[in-house]
Image (spheres, grey):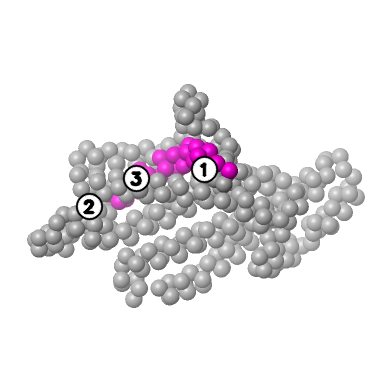
Amino acid sequence: MGRVVGRWFLTALPVVVVVSMLTFVLASLVPGDPARTILGINAPQEQVDALRQQLGLDLPLPQRYWDWLVAAAHGDLGRSITTRGSVAAELAGRLQVTLSLVVLGLIVIVLVGVGLGLISAIKGGWLGRAVDLLSLIGLAVPGFWLGLVLVAVLAVAVPIFPATGFVHFSDSPTGWAASMALPVLTLALTGTAGLAKQTRSSVLDELGKDYVRMLRARGLSERRVILLHVSRNAGAPIVTVVGLLFIGLVSGAVLLETVFVLPGLGSLTVAATKAHDIPVILGVTLILSFVVVTVNLLVEISYALLNPKVRT
């Protein structure tokens, strides 16, 4: 297990550095001047130049990135160019919204998808064909379109849930649950079918192997065979899909936050991109990169727990 964590540390740091560097270069090459955006198009050029110098925008790109990287290594993500507030403080407030949406969506996907795939593999018949059909529909339907449909049906036609907005859990747990219902349902509907199909395929593959027939011949009940042996051996590909789903849900949540007007990382990224606020863009990139590499670590640990060969 220590070797797995060690490999993660050796690969995570270069990945985060490379991704942040590419993001910095691409964001810097986008046409536009943050100083001009702040002061307005009619501001004198002298004021614009003075503000650029104050913000450090007149420095060479390598030096600007190096200064940011050194500060980030010490936990300082800098200040927003537009608001002059702490980037870390802005991200802390937004991150909980995005992670709440992603984690809740993943929980629903895992519970429903794995359960549905397991049942369809055992029962077969029409349920298996239904899982195949639903997986195709889930992959073909765009998440933002599904979100708009759910808003039209469950918030406008039948006003069960609020269409937009966010309520913090500390303010009202029921209001928080209601504000997260439609976004979570949108994420869950787009990801459940794919996980159900992968679960069904993995379980069917294991049920056809020789060790399952031997366990049945020894008199083990079907429930013990599936829960103690088949589900564990079929877990590796399922864990892989769950990890990929989590990463996909993060990008999907960024888009859905715009649809449902949630104050998460998505809306912050859109606003920062329009204003050429590079410190905020880099902060979001750093957080999301860390989330991705952490999910990969959890997947590797899950492999080691499910398969003893990985630990050796």
Q: Is residue 5 above or below residue 58?
A: below
Q: 262 or 277: which is nearer to us?
A: 262
Q: Quadrant of residue 62?
A: bottom right
In primary-sequence order, the first of circles 2 and 3 is 3
Task: Name the residue that disc number 3 marks.
Answer: 112
Query: Label 1 sits on what residue type?
Result: Pro
Measuring from the top left, give residue 180's x and y in whole percent: 50, 40
Q: Are marks 1 and 2 in contact (CB under 8 Å)?
A: no
Is residue 172 found inside the magenta-colored segment of the image?
yes
Q: Which residues are magenta?
A: 171-200
Mark number for residue 173? 1
Q: Residues within 10 Å of mark 3 (few under 14, many from 20)?
A: some
Is 36 situated left or right of 204 in this image?
right
Q: Residue at x 34, y 55 (%)?
A: 238
Between disc 2 and disc 3, the foreground one is 3
Q: Residue 65, located in which quarter of the rendered image?
A: bottom right
Mark 2 Cα within 10 Å, few/some/many (few <14, many 20+)? some
Q: Does label 3 or label 1 sit earlier along the sequence?
A: 3
* x, y percent for residue 236: 33, 60
Identify which residue, 37 or 307, lies in the foreground: 307
Q: Amino acid at mark 3?
A: Val
Image x and y of residue 91, in percent? 63, 53
Q: Magenta-highlighted stretch: main secondary structure?
A: helix
